[in-house]
Image (cartoon, rainbow, N blue to C red):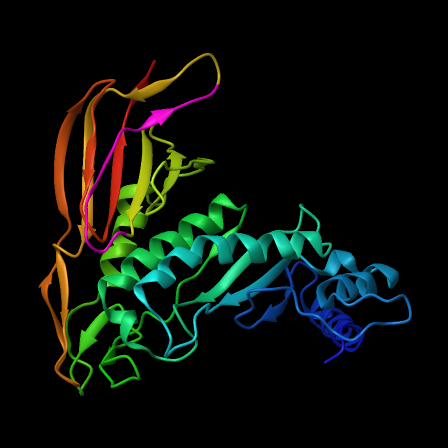
Amino acid sequence: MLPEDYGALYVQWAAAIHKVDPAARLGGPVFEGINEDIKVWPDAQGRTSWTGRFLAYLRSHGRIGDLAFVSLEHYPFEPCSITWKSLHDEPRMMKHILAALREAGVPMEIPIMVTESHISWRLTGPMSTVFAALWLADNIGSFFEAGGAAFYHSPTQPQPVQETCLGPATWSNFVTDQDYNITGYTSPYWSARLINLEWVQHRSGVHRMYASSSGAEDVTSYAVERPDGNWAVMLVNRNEQGAHEVRVVFSGGKGWRTFHGPVHMVTFGSEQYVWKTDGSRSYADPDGPPASRVIESHGQTTFTLPKASMTVLRGKIER
């Protein structure tokens, strides 16, 4: 659909809904699985950005105020061509689509939301291997680091295992039998627990996120200052064969800082989870839980990131 036609329909729906509930916050255009701004054949001014022209239509009709948020789905990979190396593409792809929408004209005051997200738009084997846990950490971490506002991973409802082009898998956070009785967990479940309960402080208030980087190509990092005064760094080691030793340093202000005192270290990866393929009876063994320990940290402390793992380090910092 041309963006101007979609804009006309959007305006009509907004008027009808606000007649019933003037306070309702509306958004769109509900992009499905995009990794780039959609291009359309040029208009009379030579403009080819679908998003830019949709926004221009709303502005020209005095209705940009009806767009309270911009939403998209994120299903980045072709279902049958995923390899372990695909993990390296996720942070770049997520940050790129948010930047592309801003460049197309989405104002900074309009939040961008991911309202559905998974590895692919079709069921595929890596959705139930440890690959999915690491992908989800990078997916969510890079989204918020790039300025995203709200994120929803889906689907999470219990579903049986099915055969796919890359092996048996389930969409779900849970493994079930054919009668939907839950028999175990999948790697995205454990990843989501680390993200929601270890990295960020669940239901607790505003977190501050800061840009971070790693000196290792295989390692990504995401840092937040939590409402409880702790700092938490989520580190993803995408090296399938080897561990990484890291030292965490916080820069800015009047000097460098490091973790000091007890640091809670929680890790989930290939040592805690292995997906066993057996058709519709596939299962994980071991099936978690994450490994947890407390390390007394000082300025020179290093932390070991096991191969194919995600790790959360949480504690106080000082100069």
Residue in view at x 55 percent, y 73 percent? 32
Frontmost residue, 1 versus 201: 1
Please name the predominant secondary structure of the magenta segment in the image: loop
Q: What range of the chain is rendered magenta?
A: 239-252
**Left or right placement of residue 46 versus residue 135 in this view:** right
Point 76% across, 73% down: residue: 3
Left or right of residue 183, residue 301 in this image: right
Q: Quadrant of the N terminus?
A: bottom right
Residue 27: x and y in percent read 64, 63
Q: Residue furthest left?
A: 286
| Residue 228, above or below 170 | above
- Any part of residue 35 in sight: yes
Q: 155 or 302: which is nearer to us?
A: 302
| Image x and y of residue 96, in percent | 56, 55
Total count of labels: 0
Quadrant where the C terminus is found in the figure: top left
Task: Give me the residue at 28% from left, 70% from top.
Answer: 126
**Is residue 262 found left or right of 211 in the rendered image?**
left
Task: Name the image quarter holding residue 5.
Answer: bottom right
Give above or below for 85 relative to 268: below
Quarter-of-image position of residue 270: bottom left
